[in-house]
Image (tube, rainbow, N blue to C red):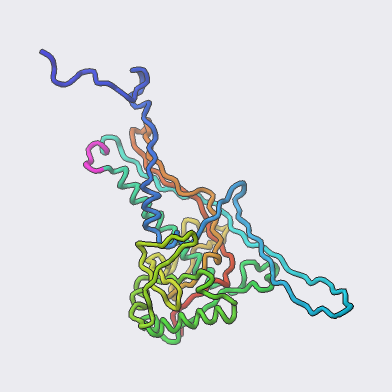
Amino acid sequence: MATIFPTSPVLPNQINNAGNENALILEQFTGDVEHTFVSTSVLEKFFPRKAVKGTNTLTKKAIGRTKLQKLKRGDAPDGTQVAFSKASVTVDTMLLSRHSIWQLDEIFTDIDTRKEIAIEQGQEIAEFMDATVSIAAAHAAAATQSAYTQGGAAPEGHMGATQIELAAAGDENDPAKLYAAIGKLFSTMEETRKVKPQRDGVVLIVRPSVFYTLQEAEQIVNGEYLTSDGNRLTGIPIFKAWGVPVLSSENLPNGVVEGHLLSNDDNGDFYDGDFSTLVAVAISPRALLIGEALPLQSSVWWSDASKCWFVDSWMSFAVGLDRVELAGRIDKFTP
């Protein structure tokens, strides 16, 4: 009597019906990580990354202000000097998120575990990227001198960032006082740094508690953000204060950060710090120098040696300071 089930099933992943039964299984690339990263990240859309290739250090040159002089009839005027300098950021760390799934567990589970893990990895990486950029933004806004300062001096026209402290304890919970502080920050940036926040693409980053407090201010208006390529951002809550987009991010640091994955001796633990008094950061993309040696990549692949599926996501980037005069911050009152 014939059996109901075949005793010699076809093995489509075996080479010439011999040897390893999984020899022809290919790596699976998943776009879930990238999709989730893009949709979850608040700041990724505002801060472009520059490719780092052929070196580990991204360098940007700066030139100081040129000068005018009065030309008199018959004079042969001398040329005037102009200073040059540079700022740089070094990419020296690769980040990896890896999870493995034993083959039987993959079979026994009633959901697509590889896909779900990839989605979670995308969210984790988005939060890490936002937190890292926020930390760098807070450092840029705290800088009292230009990132192009060399030998104690910077090219003329290159200055530090702007810092505003609230007048009294608890002012960060008062929408009117918060709004007034933002106006003071922007006006100081204009008058002392020649920065026009609306013209220079400045955005204001706050934590959710401050975001909702500000919405009680009568002067706040709803708004939308148009990117440099003409696309309107959707899915991100945005309103405007003094014509500048206000972004809510729970990843803006509000305490002590230690042991950040990108901190090391070479960068002076740049990504660590005490942010306990930070209320808001105003920053233009030009205030940061973000180098990316390896864009976000992901792969789902089979290991015959361990009989496991692996879900990997990896990237390599670093953030440094650029034109910090395009940044400013508001801090709580400190007695």
Which residue is more in the foreground, 198 or 122? 198
Residue most extreme to the front: 73
Q: Residue 56 in the image: x percent, y percent?
A: 59, 50
Q: Residue 3 in the image: x percent, y percent?
A: 13, 17
Residue most extreme to the top: 1
**Residue 206, located in which quarter of the rendered image?**
bottom left
In the image, which residues are magenta? 106-111
Residue most extreme to the right: 74
**Residue 307, located in which quarter of the rendered image?**
top left
Q: Is residue 184 above or below residue 278?
A: below
**Residue 298, located in which quarter of the rendered image?**
top left
Q: Is residue 54 above or below residue 231?
A: above
Q: Residue 245 in the image: x percent, y percent?
A: 43, 71
Residue at (72, 72) in percent of width and height? 66
324 in the magenta segment: no
Q: In this image, 76 relative to 291: left or right?
A: right
Q: Is residue 70 above or below residue 269?
A: below
Which residue is more in the foreground, 139 or 193? 193
Residue at (37, 62) in percent of width and height? 234
How many marks the image carries: the answer is 0
Q: In this image, 245 relative to 92: left or right?
A: left
Residue at (44, 80) in percent of width and height? 332
Q: Residue 91 in the image: x percent, y percent?
A: 55, 53
Q: Which image quadrant: the N terminus? A: top left
Residue most extreme to the bottom: 168
